[in-house]
C-alpha cells in the first residue's frame, strides 16, 4: 500500500511538471502571430525577433540558417532557432527582405 502511494505521488509530481512546462511553452509561443517564427539573434546575449516565415526561403536568410546549422547543428540546447550573427547584421538582412 505504501509503495503504491509513493508511486502515485511521483506520478502526480511528474504530471504537474509536464503541465507546467507545456503552459510555459504555450505562453512563450503565444506571442508569435500566425505565419511568423521566433528566432534568437546575437553572439553574446541573444535577442528574440519575430519574423515572417517567408524569410526562410530567401537566399540571404538561408545563408544565416546554414551558419546556424554549422555552429549548433540541429540539436541546440536553447530550444529555439538561434542565428549566430550580430543584431545589426540581422536587422540589415531583415530590412532588405522587408523591402523586397
Image: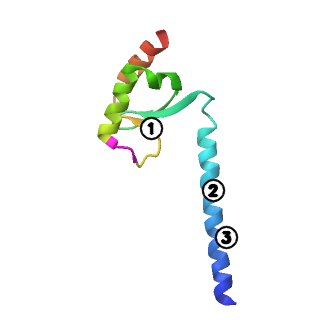
At which x and y percent is residue 35?
Answer: 59, 27
At which x and y percent is residue 82?
A: 41, 37
Q: Residue at x 47, y 41 (%)?
A: 80
Write down the region rendered in magenta.
72-76
In primary-sequence order, the first of circles 3 and 2 is 3
Which quadrant of the view contains residue 33? Answer: top right
In the rendered image, residue 26, in percent from the top left (x then y), is placed at 63, 44
Q: Residue 20's mark?
A: 2
From the image, tell me which residue sits under label 1: 81
Q: Label 1, label 3: how many angstroms apart (C-alpha)?
A: 32 Å
- Taking the view exactly as shown, the residue that stands out farthest to the top is 99
Q: Is residue 43 left or right of residue 98?
A: left
Q: How many marks?
A: 3
What secondary structure is found at the residue carrying circle 1?
Answer: strand
Proximity of marks 2 and 1: CB atoms separated by less than 8 Å: no
Mark drawn on residue 40: none
Colour theme: rainbow
Residue at (52%, 26%) from the top-left corner?
A: 53
Q: CA distance from mark 2 to mark 1?
A: 22 Å
* Chief secondary structure of the magenta portion: loop
Name which of mark 1 and mark 3 comes first in the sequence: 3
Q: Is residue 72 above or below residue 11?
A: above
Give the side of residue 67 with respect to residue 8, left or right: left
Density class for disc 2 (Cα within 10 Å; few <14, some 14-19, many ≥20) is: few
Is residue 91 located in the magenta-colored stretch of the structure? no
Q: Secondary structure at mark 2?
A: helix
Where residue 81 appears, as percent x and y from the top left, is 44, 38
Residue drawn where x is 64% and y is 37% of the image: 30
Q: Which residue is mark 3?
A: 12
Q: Nearer the viewer, mark 2 or mark 1?
A: 1
Amino acid at each position: 500500500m505504501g509503495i503504491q502511494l509513493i508511486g502515485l505521488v511521483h506520478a502526480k509530481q511528474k504530471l504537474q511538471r509536464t503541465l507546467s512546462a507545456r503552459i510555459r511553452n504555450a505562453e512563450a509561443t503565444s506571442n508569435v502571430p500566425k505565419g511568423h517564427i521566433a528566432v534568437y539573434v546575437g553572439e553574446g546575449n541573444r535577442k528574440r525577433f519575430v519574423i515572417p516565415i517567408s524569410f526562410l526561403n530567401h537566399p540571404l536568410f538561408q545563408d544565416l540558417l546554414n551558419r546556424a546549422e554549422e555552429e549548433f547543428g540541429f540539436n541546440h540546447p536553447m530550444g529555439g532557432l538561434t542565428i549566430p550573427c550580430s543584431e545589426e547584421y540581422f536587422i540589415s538582412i531583415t530590412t532588405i527582405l522587408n523591402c523586397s
